[in-house]
């Protein structure tokens, strides 16, 4: 499938963002481990959360999590501490996303896991059982989902968990989000030092819990607003918190540098509220930023800066190589289609010095990656009629994205060759 997008001359919209899948997936694992019957309120409705819900409700012998990396990591740990025999698998891309670090750590804790096909990669055969827990050390510069997967099962381990992270620790806000959520459900879990987290063997409790909407999804609306002139755009986003625990809430700070003003309505502390974003004068002339703590925002910000002719040097992108696609290479390839020559360095940096080429305006490929589709869609504001291949990939995290664009005045036309 291919679509062609045209943007309205002015942007005015009130958008109901999807619930945070990061919080939803963590809350679902905690809910299952607590043995509770009160499902979290405002669960995310997207592919990544749906596969977790289905797995926990039906617990089939073979669990196919499709392209959901979070589900693969979290369920690997969960299935290891629950009685039963299961095989967990996914798409071909998932079968090439490494999971050896997590499996090794789980085996250290006593888990019975073996590889069904290639060593170090899914599918996995898991015999679940009670685990004693104890000490384990993993690298801190890998996906924080490995860390969160281990932390989430910590309270049900007989001796709890002492998790040491070696080297540079990336995506720390996602780790802190996990710890915060665990404590919300009664766990005793926290940093014991700068590189060590201790989880006591104290079971989760049951409680009602409201899931905040998704700051990652908000980022695409920030991008759209940034691409409009002053007084030509106003977007209202509901269900977000000013002091959010979501790492991607830093989008409001990043986009303040790119000319977007964020205003929160009056609200009760700790409760979701309405956010209004508008363009203002004066984006920076050049930007350097380390995405170590918010790698999922990188595609959105890279595309925005190119569209605004703002040179950049972005670091902290190591994890982009092992996402739904190699996002570093995908960004370089697709941005060239619209005339921007971006280069990479050290497998963890993206640099643009303003170099351009003649745009081919070929359709943007999405590589089975939802964030490629959503990060490039706002470019239709600058390039009317921009075409995107396989737009349905947004179902992974934001199924209503295209409908929301239509409600905001965008024209989206399906193209048949």
Image: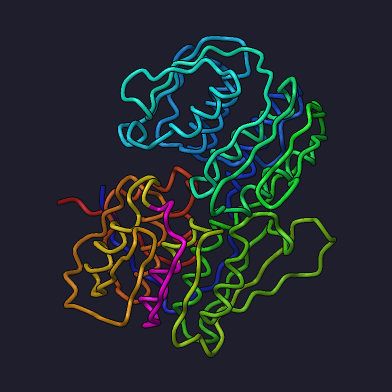
According to the image, what is the colour scheme of the structure? rainbow
Residue 166 forms part of the magenta stretch: no
> What is the quadrant of residue 273 in the picture?
bottom right
What x and y, as percent, mark residue 256?
58, 78
Q: Position of 359 compared to 373: left or right? A: left
> What is the quadrant of residue 413 in the picture?
bottom left
What x and y, as percent, mark residue 241?
72, 60
Residue at 73% from the left image edge and 47% from the top image edge = 191
Residue at 37% from the left image edge and 29% from the top image edge = 121
Residue at 41% from the left image edge and 62% from the top image edge = 299
Residue reaching furthest to the top: 84
Is residue 221 shown above or below 323? below
Count of numbered badges drawn on the protein? 0
Residue at 38% from the left image edge and 69% from the top image edge = 303
Camera-side residue of 174 and 59: 174
**Magenta-drawn segment:** 301-320
> What is the quadrant of residue 96 in the picture?
top left
């Amino acid at each position: 499938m291919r679509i062609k997008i045209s943007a309205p001359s002015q942007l005015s919209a009130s958008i109901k963002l999807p619930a945070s899948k990061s919080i939803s997936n963590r809350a679902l694992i905690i809910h299952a481990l607590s043995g509770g019957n009160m499902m979290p309120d405002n669960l995310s409705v997207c592919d990544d959360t749906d596969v977790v819900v289905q797995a926990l409700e039906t617990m089939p012998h073979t669990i196919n999590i499709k392209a959901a990396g979070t589900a693969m990591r979290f369920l690997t740990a969960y299935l290891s501490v629950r009685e039963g025999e299961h095989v967990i698998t996914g798409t071909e891309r998932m079968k090439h996303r490494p999971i050896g670090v997590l499996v090794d750590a789980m085996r250290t804790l006593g888990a019975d896991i073996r590889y069904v096909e290639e060593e170090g990669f899914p599918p996995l055969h898991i015999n679940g059982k009670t685990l004693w827990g104890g000490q384990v050390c993993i690298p801190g510069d890998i996906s924080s989902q490995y860390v969160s997967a281990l932390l989430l099962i910590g309270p049900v381990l007989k001796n709890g968990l002492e998790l040491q992270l070696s080297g540079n620790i990336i995506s720390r806000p996602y780790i802190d989000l996990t710890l915060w959520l665990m404590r919300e459900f009664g766990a005793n879990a926290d940093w014991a030092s700068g590189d060590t987290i201790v989880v006591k063997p104290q079971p989760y409790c049951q409680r009602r819990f409201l899931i905040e909407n998704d700051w990652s999804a908000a980022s695409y609306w920030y991008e759209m607003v940034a691409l409009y002139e002053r007084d030509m755009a106003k977007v209202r986003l509901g269900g977000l918190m000013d002091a959010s625990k979501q790492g991607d809430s830093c989008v409001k700070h990043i986009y303040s540098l790119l000319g977007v003003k964020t205003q929160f309505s009056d609200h009760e502390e700790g409760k979701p509220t309405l956010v209004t974003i508008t363009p203002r004068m004066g984006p920076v002339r050049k930007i350097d930023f380390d995405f170590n703590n918010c790698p999922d925002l990188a595609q959105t910000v890279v595309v925005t800066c190119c569209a605004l002719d703002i040179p950049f040097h972005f670091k902290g992108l190591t994890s982009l190589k092992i996402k739904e696609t190699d996002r570093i290479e995908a960004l370089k390839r697709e941005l060239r289609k619209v005339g921007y020559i971006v280069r990479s360095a050290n497998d963890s940096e993206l640099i643009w010095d303003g170099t351009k080429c003649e745009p081919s305006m070929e359709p943007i490929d999405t590589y089975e990656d939802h964030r490629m589709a959503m990060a490039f869609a706002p470019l239709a504001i600058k390039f009317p009629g921009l075409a995107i291949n396989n737009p349905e990939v947004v179902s992974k995290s934001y199924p209503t994205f295209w409908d929301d664009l239509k409600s905001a005045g965008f024209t989206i036309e399906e193209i048949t060759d």
